[in-house]
Image: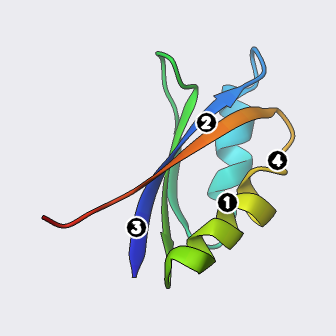
């Protein structure tokens, strides 16, 4: 199992809408609107890195209002 945080920049005023839409996607644990350089932070899970990439590219990035994403896989040290 691979876990990751996805940091998202949205169009102005769309953070809450984007967070709500993303929270409905399978593989998303949580999606919260936040303040700072990113507008939404998402916790995601997938079976492996390829599945994580597929989730981000085919399910998350197409959500209307998203400008940019940054995927941060969780590591266990």
- Secondary structure beneath dot 3 equals strand
Q: Which residue is mark 1?
A: 56
Q: Earlier in the sequence, mark 4 or mark 1?
A: 1
Q: Earlier in the sequence, mark 3 or mark 4?
A: 3
Question: CA–CA distance between discs 2 and 1?
Answer: 11 Å
Q: Quadrant of residue 24?
A: bottom right
Q: Which residue is mark 2?
A: 8
Q: Earlier in the sequence, mark 2 or mark 1?
A: 2
Q: Nearer the viewer, mark 4 or mark 1?
A: 1
Q: Position of residue 65 (x, y in %)?
A: 82, 32
Give the residue displayed 76% in from the left and 50% down from the top: 61
Question: CA–CA distance between discs 4 and 2?
Answer: 11 Å
Question: CA–CA distance between discs 2 and 3?
Answer: 16 Å
Residue closest to the far left: 77
Q: Quadrant of residue 23?
A: bottom right
Q: Earlier in the sequence, mark 2 or mark 3?
A: 3
Left or right of 57? Residue 43 is: left
Q: Which residue is mark 4?
A: 63
The answer to whether mark 4 and mark 2 are in CB contact below 8 A is no
Left or right of 65? Residue 48 is: left
Question: CA–CA distance between discs 3 and 4?
Answer: 20 Å
Q: Residue 3 — which label? A: 3
Q: Position of residue 72 (x, y in %)?
A: 44, 50
Q: Position of residue 33 (x, y in %)?
A: 55, 31
Q: Residue 73 — which label? A: none
């Amino acid at each position: 199992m691979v876990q990751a945080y996805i940091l998202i920049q949205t169009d102005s005023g769309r953070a809450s809408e984007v967070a709500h839409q993303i929270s409905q996607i399978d593989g998303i644990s949580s999606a919260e609107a936040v303040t700072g350089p990113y507008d939404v932070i998402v916790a995601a899970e997938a079976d492996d890195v390829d599945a994580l990439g597929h989730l981000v590219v085919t399910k998350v990035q197409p959500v209307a209002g998203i400008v940019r994403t940054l995927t941060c896989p969780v590591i266990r040290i």
